[in-house]
Image: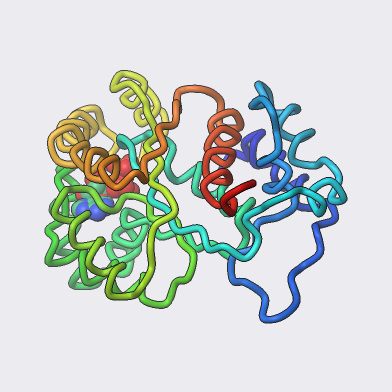
Amino acid sequence: MQITSAKAATIQANKKPRAKKAASPAPKTEATSDAVQLSGAKAPAASTSGLTQQATSSATQAATACCGPSGTALRMILTGPPGGGKGTQAELIQKFFKGTTHLSTGELLRQQVKEGTELGKQAQVYMQKGELVPDSIILAMVDQKLAGEESFILDGFPRSKAQAEHLDQTLARLGKSLTAVANLQVDDEIVVKRLKERGRQDDTEEIIRNRLKVYHEQTEPVIGHYQAQALLEQVAAEGKVAEVGYNMITQLNSRLRPQGC
Ligand code: ADP
């Protein structure tokens, strides 16, 4: 996989000294000092070098910042159209919010297909057409994965209002609440172009167009569901990976700040 400039920036950022860790027990999610530093940034960086500079600024400044997300679990949903960059952004977020698990239902399903399991065989029929895999397959799989996770990024789930309502119930049962839902906004034609270039098995133009249709009909209503819960963060996602990531991490960080900061 191509190493993007944003990844290079965050990899470099993570080599810098970190703010002091909290005394034990250590929180499962621990944002790096870089993320704390990002929270104090005045204006989003417009370039990768800007991101690097912001992200690699001194740990001292971070340690003296009035507030930061250290010790707070990030629990978020990444939504948006196919090709919106959810997987790429999830990797970036993980670099800043250490200990956060990336749960991609698409990846989990592809793994099952690869292993030739019964679940994989059933799911493949839908995936090959760009249709949603039935909830009877998806919901139990997600519930099982979520049960042990304190801090997570859900990517590709929920993909319908019914899935969102199910997730609400699961999280309530687990006594966990969401930090935010980030919606990556990308125009349909840019999606088609991006995915054709990516060239995964389900990235033919016909299947992409059907995935977009399914997205608009079934997944977009999920945005309203979370807007009503005041969890929604709209993220313009047609720009460079680093810019999109910077903006999103800044938005997430401000949600994790203790009140009054
Ligand atoms: P993309 O977002 O690029 O379409 P994903 O990897 O998220 O790719 O999903 C690939 C396919 O897996 C989808 O087209 C769908 O068939 C199936 N899938 C993934 N997540 C879900 C889900 N939450 N509910 C139903 N089907 C899903």
Q: Residue at x 18, y 32 (%)?
A: 216
The relative height of residue 247 versus residue 7 in the rendered view (above or below) is: above
The image shows residue 110 at horizontal and vertical percentages of 32, 58
What scheme was used to colour the molecule? rainbow
In the figure, is residue 233 to the left or right of 169? right
Pick the front one: 1 or 184: 184
Residue extending furthest toward the front: 260
Residue, far bottom: 25
Q: Quadrant of residue 81?
A: top left
Which residue lies at the image location 59% right of the left edge and 28% below the top edge?
A: 243
| Residue 53 against residue 127 in the figure, above or below | above
Q: Position of residue 52 (x, y in %)?
A: 75, 35
Residue at 32% x, 57% y is: 105
7 and 234: which one is in front? 234
Residue 201, located in which quarter of the rendered image?
top left
- Residue 201 appears in view: no
Give whichever of 178, 3 is nearer the camera. 178
Instruction: List x then y, in percent, for residue 34.
Output: 73, 47
**Percent x, y of residue 47:** 68, 23
